[in-house]
Image (cartoon, rainbow, N blue to C red):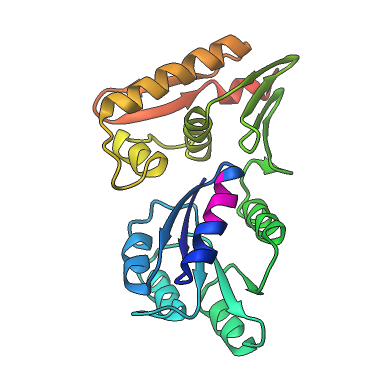
Amino acid sequence: MKILLIEDERLIADALAVVLQKHNYSVDNAYDGEYGLDCALSDVYDYIILDVMLPKKDGLSILKELRDKGIKTPVIMLTARGEVKDRITGLNLGADDYIPKPFHVEELLARLNAISRRRGELLVDGVIRLGPLSFNPHNLTLEYFDKELSLTLKESQLFELLLTNKDTLVSKDYIIEKLWSYDADITDSHVESQVSLLRKKLLAVGTKITIKAIRRVGYRLEGLEELKNV
């Protein structure tokens, strides 16, 4: 999962990013509102963590513009503990949740999981389950019946991306945007390599799930429906 963290207090933002990365989230930091809005409008993030008080453009204005432009990415607002008005305004503008500062990281992680459940995703207690297949994106494990394999972080992120977009074709450009940062020197060959490695892991664990490549269009998972009958 890819998170955009818009927070101007750099020490807090950088420390929070490190913790989220340890839980296998991919995190991009934005330290002011204007840059944060530009990033958010790309619509490549799974979640946005948005502070209310920001330089150049405040968080509530960012949230309003995102929703006005049809960006539905879940947003968790960070507010000063006493600012009830900001929380109410944020929720009315379309925020999915808020956390008053200061907060415990464990609470933020729990709220991210809660939003996943409300969105109807396959995530249950941090684990994606499809019949006998269990995929844990937080400890990077893939289990099928009695076989279990470890994935690399990029393999895990790719599998999660394909699973959460299982009804659509996922382009190479979209994979690059979601799995790597904007300034990374990544080419199509990096994507092809990760797809090949993930295919081998899916085969090794015994599942019949395959990654179908549609030339010049993208990738999709096949064989998911068969798991329901296993």
In the rendered image, the vertical position of residue 105 relative to residue 79, given as above or below: above
Which residue is more in the foreground, 128 or 12? Answer: 12
Taking the spot 58% from the left edge, 50% from the top edge, the residue there is 20
In the rendered image, the vertical position of residue 197 relative to residue 129, given as above or below: above
Give the prevailing secondary structure in the magenta stretch: helix
Q: Is residue 172 magenta?
A: no
Which residue is more in the foreground, 148 or 65? Answer: 148
Quarter the C terminus occupies? top right
Q: Is residue 17 magenta?
A: yes
Q: Position of residue 7 (x, y in %)?
A: 47, 69
Q: Position of residue 80 (x, y in %)?
A: 61, 82
Taking the spot 61% from the left edge, 20% from the top edge, the residue there is 226
Magenta span covers which residues? 16-21
Which residue is more in the foreground, 141 or 214? Answer: 141
Taking the spot 61% from the left edge, 84% from the top edge, the residue there is 88
Tell me how many marks there are. Answer: 0
With 82 as the anchor, is 60 left or right in this view? Answer: left
> Which quadrant of the view contains residue 201?
top right
In the rendered image, the vertical position of residue 134 relative to residue 101, given as above or below: above
With 69 as the anchor, is 226 left or right in this view? Answer: right
Q: Position of residue 133 (x, y in %)?
A: 67, 24
Q: Position of residue 116 (x, y in %)?
A: 62, 52
Which residue is more in the foreground, 215 or 103? Answer: 103
